Image: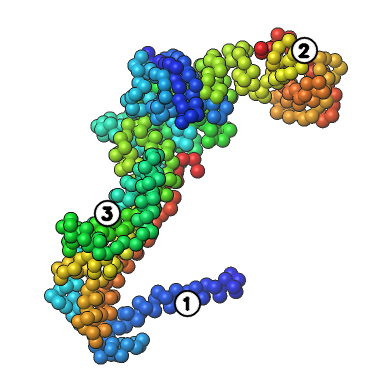
Amino acid sequence: MTSVKLKSVKKSFGAVDIIKGIDLTIEDGEFCVFVGPSGCGKSTLLRIISGLEEATEGTIEIDGRDVTGEEPSKRGIAMVFQSYALYPHLTVRENVGFGLSLAKLPKDVIRQKVDAAAEALQLTHLLDRKPKALSGGQRQRVAIGRAMVRDPKVFLLDEPLSNLDAALRAQMRIELTDLHRKLGATMIYVTHDQVEAMTMADKIVVLNSGRIEQVGSPMDLYNNPVSPFVAGFIGSPKMNLYDGPVAAAQGCKTYGIRPEHVVLSATNGTWKGSVRHVEHLGADTVVYLVVPEMGEIVVRVSGDFKAAHGDILWASPVAGREFRFN
Amino acid sequence: MTSRQRNTGIIAFLAAFIIFILPFVFTFFMAVKSRQEAALFLFTWPSEWHFWSNLVEVVQARNYMLLLAYFNSTIITVGAVALLVIFGAMVGYVLQRRPSGWNKLIYAGVLMGLMVPPAVVPTIWVLQGLGLFKTIHGMILIQVAYGLAFSVLLYRSFIATIPRDLDEAAIIDGAKPWAIFFKVILPLLKPVTVTLILVQSIAIFNDFTNPLYYLPGRENVTVQLTLFNFQSQFQSQFNLLFMNILLVTIPPLIVFVIFNRQIVAGMTAGAVKG
């Protein structure tokens, strides 16, 4: 059982508290995603788990063993960096086998392991190339290969897809999920992209300024966000959130409704507004409506919705899909 | 090409020719002349060619002193440059990567080493105290001391361009600091190492004053000092002096030709997304 347990982990840089006390258990074989805006401490938390950064307080357990003071290489982890961090002077084969040759494994064992990893990642024909002769996606795969050959108990991935273009990112998302299924290893994945979090995770950990905001499965967070922060972070386009008189009229501090849970009508509804902007995405249409008493409301309508700038429309929330936060 | 570009090109070529090529041609002509003709000190085509006889005479002069000088200079140059590369890269790496309160102080010391001119007499006093005066290894250490500040600064700024992720990836892979430096960082420093070897080996091989002060003694002679000896001994034999100059100029020229091709930029290309 390779679970990862964090017990009241804190981290400060000088007087600045980056991580303000985190308790978290990641189960064996789970794909856990840390998500949050920049500067929320998600990368720092990953680096604390890897051992590259020391926790100011608290303990880290991997596989039931306290590894708080252990060196990174003794923790049974492998890490994939955002920048790939491939050694430029070594070939793909040497890059992937670097850790094994440091561990002084026999040459034929290294060759065997590297070949196996290369085959799993379709890198076999690239083994003798240097990183500069590879494309972004191939470099990414080499970085994953380098992590794989170490047979780690836990994979740590620090925004591994953020340097790839949109099409490749979508493809790599599927490949990573496949890989997770095949290896069955525990994976901890850091991203600021909520789409990656929603599509890949078994468990999402939403972080906000050094604290855990909510932990749960993707649909759990979508359906039952505990705070306006989580509600606004999960889902695209983001949830419409209103404070002040609009919320007060609904009897709460913050009132929220997702764009896909608003219906538009030309004749009647709850809020009357004029169209500011329309985005036609093909499969659905996103309408930005300006309602005088509440400001802007974003509405997502399925299919091609005919509307133009200045049109007057009525918007109504779907019953039971509204969120009221206190 | 516009006429302006062409004119600038021609002027630049002429200037380079006058500054770099003409003196070399002059040296060569003087070196192959006879003693009487060289004494005239004219920039003329030699009337008789004495290349081989002059060469043999220079090499054999004062009991093959030139060969001993080549040997000594080569040892000093290779020893000093090797230490400069290793220590420069190590100090530069630690200064750049490991932040500590001492860094500012060390950095100030390095800058001081670059700016403050060395004093000869106290240095000799220190060398005598350490038993290193008039020794080849003492001379090597002097050259290392004089060149280390420059090489530390050069390495430090270059190491700053190597992403720290590489160090961390190596740590995760289980590398100890020693292995990180020798297996990951040092190979990536090749362009700056080549530059340093080129600059320092030419400077150390051609050094005249430091061996003159710190390395007296017949058996300690270095190549540039052979010129000094010749000049006093063969005051009117300019043909031999210039032949000696020619011979002394060749090794640095070879070093330059070999290494100049290898100064390649972009060694870190491919390390991170670029």
Q: Residue A193 location, x and y as percent?
A: 57, 27
Relative to residue A169, is residue B257 depicted above or below? below
Q: Quadrant of residue A86?
A: top left
* Circle 1 crowding by C-alpha within 10 Å: few under 14, some 14–19, many from 20: few
Residue B14's label in the rendered image is 1
Which mark is in front, 2 or 3? 2
Amino acid at dot 2: Ala
Q: Where, quadrant-wise, is the N terminus of chain A in this rendering?
A: top left
Q: Residue A10 location, x and y as percent?
A: 45, 22
Secondary structure type for disc 1: helix
Q: Residue furthest top?
A: A320
Amino acid at dot 3: Ala
Q: Residue at x 40, y 27 (%)?
A: A54
Does the image show residue B260? yes
Secondary structure type for disc 2: helix
- Total number of numbered discs in the rendering: 3
Q: Residue A14 location, x and y as percent?
A: 46, 31
Residue B82's label in the rendered image is 3
Q: Residue at x 77, y 24 (%)?
A: A295
Q: Where, quadrant-wise, is the C terminus of chain A in this rendering?
A: top right
* Circle 2 crowding by C-alpha within 10 Å: few under 14, some 14–19, many from 20: few
Relative to residue B83, is residue A249 depicted above or below? above
Q: Circle 2 sits on which residue?
A: A249
